[in-house]
Image: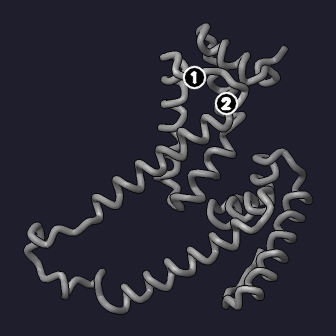
Amino acid sequence: MKIEQCSDYELVKAYISGNEAAVEALILRYKRKVYTYIYYRIRNKEVTADLFQETFIKVFRSIKEDKYADDGKLGAWIMRIAHNLIIDHIRRETRLNTIAMDNYEYDLLNNKNLSEKNAEHRIIKSETDKEIHKLLDCLPENQREIVIMRHFLGMSFKEIADETNVSINTALGRMRYALINLKKLIKEHQLEMELTE
């Protein structure tokens, strides 16, 4: 039997026994789901790549240290690790972005990045992003995934088709239905946005 055809349980056992090919097989099996999940919450490719890598380092370290009790839910366990790392990252960022006025010797009121125009732009963008993510949450998972890959990750339809193991026509069809559904949702929520493939 090829290693890609092994169950999660068999791959975990193979990895514990020293079979490094099991590592690659497990990462390939969960790569798309984990990466998309992290990116959808972080919306930064570099940070997503770091957290993705950190997730699997933690997964394999935990397996080696016998901290994974096989219950047939390896995928859910990996997603929980990714989720916890996302939460840790957000907490770290929040702490780093807290401004302590005593640490700054220049005039904050004259800072270009904090000007009224930039602040207004950031608020509008933040609100728009929140609305978009609420709308995406309303889509079926396979449509939401295509939108994220196309518009947030900048993938071509060929790359999306390869990554999701569907034909290009299926990927295009899912995008078309996603856009139809998003347009309906935008109309229902009376939002002003322009959607294109």
The colour scheme applied to this rendered structure is: one colour
- In which quadrant is the C terminus drawn? bottom right
With 12 as the anchor, is 158 left or right in this view? Answer: right
Three-letter residue code for mark 2: Leu
Three-letter residue code for mark 1: Tyr
- Tell me which residue sits at (70%, 91%) in the image: 190
* Coordinates of residue 40 in the picture (x, y in percent): 60, 59
Between residue 74 and residue 192, name the one nearer to us: 74
- Near mark 1 (Cα within 10 A), the count class, few <14, some 14-19 or many ≥20, is some
With 150 as the anchor, is 177 left or right in this view? Answer: right
Q: Are marks 2 and 1 in contact (CB under 8 Å)?
A: yes
Q: Is residue 50 above or below residue 116?
A: above
Q: Secondary structure at mark 2?
A: helix
Residue tagged 1? 68
- Near mark 2 (Cα within 10 A), the count class, few <14, some 14-19 or many ≥20, is some
Residue tagged 2? 74
Q: Earlier in the sequence, mark 2 or mark 1?
A: 1
